Amino acid sequence: MHIRRGTPEDVDAVLALLDGAVEWLVAQGRTGQWGTEPWSTQPAFTERVTGRAERGELRVAELDGQVAGALSVSETAAAYVTPAGEPELYVNLLATDRRHEGRGVGAALLDEARAEARRRGLPLLRVDCFAGDDQKLVGYYRSQGFAEVGPFTVRRAGLPDWPGMLLAQRLDR
C-alpha cells in the first residue's frame, strides 16, 4: 500500500470511491449516513472534495495502482462540533473501497493522520462520524484508539437530523 498526497487529478477517483461507499451503504439499508445519491452527482460534495485536494488536505491510499481509500485532514474542525480549545489535526473525511475490505486501508490512513499530526507538533487528533443505525462506525473509531468526546446533532433543512459522535485521540509528541 502506498499513501500519498492527493491532487486535483485524484478527484474523480475519490468521487468514484465515495459513490461506491454510498452504493454499499444503501444496499445495507443504511441511508442515514450519506443519503442515497452518489457524491459525484452533487455539486456541493464534488466542490468539497476538489477544495480539499486543492488545499493539500487530501491523502489517497493506493493498492495495485488504484485508489483504495481517501483521507482529508486539516487543522480546522467541522463547524458543527465543539472546538477543541487547543491545536489539533481533524479528520474531515475517511473512506475506503469495499473491494479492499480487510486489508487495513482505513487503519493505514488513520496512521498517516497520526504521523502528520506528530510532524506538525499537534497533540490531538479528532474525528466525527455518523452515530445512527447500529453505531458500527463509532465502534470502528474506538477500535482505532479514539475515545468518545460526545454526541451531537446536525439539523438539516428538509432532511432528517444527522446524529453524530465526536471522538478524539491524544498523541505522543
Image (spheres, rainbow, N blue to C red):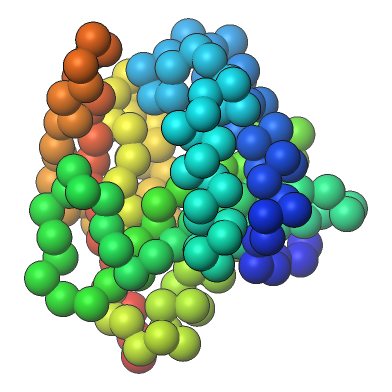
Q: Position of residue 148 (x, y in %)?
A: 21, 51
Residue at 73 percent across and 42 percent down: it is 13
- 135 up-or-down from 37: above or below: below
Residue at 23 percent across and 10 percent down: it is 158
- 137 up-or-down from 2: above or below: above
Query: Could you tell me which quadrant the C terminus lies in?
Result: bottom left
Give left or right: position of 73 versus 128: right
- Asked whether 22 or 145 is in front, the reply is 22
- Asked whether 5 or 69 is in front, the reply is 5
Give left or right: position of 160 versus 67: left
- Residue 114 visible? The answer is yes
Q: Position of residue 111 (x, y in %)?
A: 53, 68
- Asked whether 42 or 81 is in front, the reply is 42
- 98 up-or-down from 2: above or below: above
Q: Position of residue 134 (x, y in %)?
A: 34, 22
Q: How many marks are shown on the rendered structure?
A: 0
Q: Position of residue 115 (x, y in %)?
A: 50, 78
Furthest residue in direction right, as rendered: 64
- Asked whether 157 or 166 is in front, the reply is 157
Residue at 46 percent across and 87 percent down: it is 119
Give left or right: position of 27 versus 114: right
Query: Could you tell me which quadrant the N terminus lies in?
Result: bottom right
- Quadrant of the rendered image containing residue 61: bottom right
- Residue 17 visible? The answer is no
Residue at 28 percent across and 81 percent down: it is 123
